[in-house]
Image (cartoon, rainbow, N blue to C red):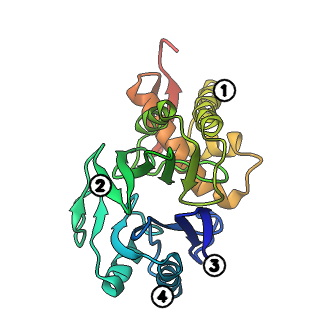
Amino acid sequence: MLVRDLPYVGRLTAPNPSLMTGKGTNTYIFGTGDLAIVDPGPDDNDHIAAIEAGIEELGGTPVLILVTHSHLDHLPGAFSLQRRIGVPIATYAPILGVDIALRHDQRLTIGGHPLRALHTPGHAADHLAFLLEEERVLFSGDLIVGEGTVVIGRDGELDEYLRSLESLLPLDLQLILPGHGPTITDPRARIEGYIAHRHEREREILDAIAAEISTINEIVEEIYADVDPRLYPAAAQSVDAHLRKLVRDRRVGTYLEDGVTHYELAGDE
């Protein structure tokens, strides 16, 4: 079912619910006359058909498919949708099969609505967010999600992620349309909360290491004790991202013991 976030923005949720994707990946269709589709999601025939129905409901002509990043719950459906509607695909990275490689701060106009592409790495190196400039509405992909926090995977870096979050603060956003979960109506508070959460996690990790809790798995069990253990693999990715940053910042060092990497506070910590 197409949900209207704005009169010219419709949202569909792909049927790919999981611990990582929440209720599923959000796909957005927006514009007046000419339409763009943001994040067609996974390669799911029913979802692609729902996007086509949503295009018809909005009553416009599709001209472009925009993808926030190349993760499997966001990109693959773009190729199936393209085969059906015959419009170009645009992403940040020059991925095989993608027609347009967007650059940071590139401006487009879709159906009379100025749109700016913002390179926002961190969750993934190739991550873009899309800003409807006049409305100050952001399609955030997985930079910010509607519920919970974001995993920083091996293709992302925490320091980049924090810089991407901080870059949103001057935009004075009115609404965030996330890649997963409900619309965010308090953008500044949510962004500041995300930043504060990461700094708190860093403190928790440093405290754990100071207490000689020294491997990623041990740190996860310590600081995520109240989290569903099924989420521990995702939590381990985020802890790993924090530790990579702390090592680069020379606040934490590493050593091997029985083939396992251990972490210790740097000498001046």
Three-letter code for the amino acid on which mark 3 is drawn: Met
Please tell me which of labels 1 and 3 falls first in the chain. Answer: 3
Q: Quadrant of the N terminus?
A: bottom right
* SS label for mark 4: helix
- Classify 10 Å Cα crowding around label 4: few (below 14), some (14-19), many (20 and above): few
Three-letter code for the amino acid on which mark 2 is drawn: Tyr
User: In this figure, which residue is indicated by the disc labeled 3?
Assistant: 1
Please tell me which of labels 4 and 1 falls first in the chain. Answer: 4
Please tell me which of labels 3 and 4 falls first in the chain. Answer: 3
Three-letter code for the amino acid on which mark 4 is drawn: Asn
- Classify 10 Å Cα crowding around label 3: few (below 14), some (14-19), many (20 and above): few
User: In this figure, which residue is indicated by the disc labeled 2?
Assistant: 92
Q: Distance between the residues labelled 4 and 2?
A: 25 Å
User: In this figure, which residue is indicated by the disc labeled 1?
Assistant: 211
Give percent across and percent down for residue 163: 43, 33
Frontmost residue, 69 versus 4: 4
